Amino acid sequence: MNAALRLTDIHKHFGERRILDDVAIALESGQCHVLSGRNGAGKTTLMKILAGLERPDSTQVKLDGVARPWRQLRHTLRRDVVYLHQYAYMFDASVEDNVGYGLRAARLPAGERRARVAEALERVDLTHLAGANARTLSGGERQRVALARAWVLRPRVMLLDEPTANMDRESREQTWFLLRRLRGDQLCVVVATHDTQAIATLPDVHLHLEEGKLRRQPAGAHDPAPSPVSAAHPAATAHDPRREGRM
């Protein structure tokens, strides 16, 4: 497997509270990583650091074999990593316009933009809703639009923060199916979740964050492993997407 992104020596405090303590993480292309941990453990903070959206106290980032401080690569992270909040924001526009938002912002030619949006909608089985107003969709459909809007940007890494919160069983299972499909595109997918079904069945790599330490679990395990991930053996609010990584 090729590493899409590696970070080592991640430290983060909020006041006197230690959130991340010497964390190391390696994200592999074509794999799905599930990130578990209690509420407040720091999962969202870690994901936003990975996406270039939250400044760590310190860390080293390795991309394409080059290691540099986070501050020197934060703009590259924002380009190559997409972060999706659990509540998918929809513009008051059609599904296809929502999916193409990032491509318009990047000023891609109209023909290429239309082709990529059509491919993304087919990828998430929403071609039949291309012309529908995105704000009229169900929660599960909105999440699929958000996935398409991220995928169409062709990132290295897609980060999803509790993507199935408040979904019914059918919608959750459809979301997990789509994530497995996207993983097959050599995209690295990272999912922060409390969903026990996802933890049991989805990941190639299961990471558990507890007391500032990131620990690698056997795939499908529910309880934290006894030893922390090391750099030598690395792990394997409706938010406006304009405020999130490249969305």
Image (cartoon, rainbow, N blue to C red):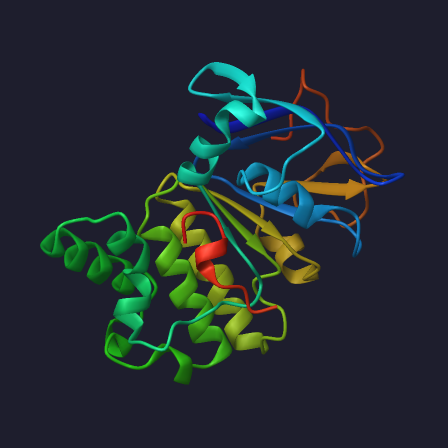
Left of 233 or right of it: where is 238?
A: left
**Residue at 27% of width from left, 47% of height from top?**
106
Report the front residue among 102 and 225. 102
Q: As rendered, which of 17 and 134 lies closer to the eye?
A: 17
Tell me: residue 29, above or below residue 106: above
Residue at 29% over, 52% down: 105
Residue lying furthest left in this view? 111
Whole-percent x, y for residue 111 in the image: 10, 55
Q: Position of residue 210 (x, y in %)?
A: 82, 42
Residue 85 drawn above or below residue 4 = below
Q: In which quarter of the image is the C terminus?
A: bottom left
Q: Residue at x 60, y 26 (%)?
A: 7
| Residue nearest the viewer, comparing 60 with 23 | 60
Side of 133 where 209 appears, left or right:
right
Count of number-bearing discs: 0
The quadrant where residue 33 appears: top right
**Residue 97 at what x, y percent from top left?**
27, 68
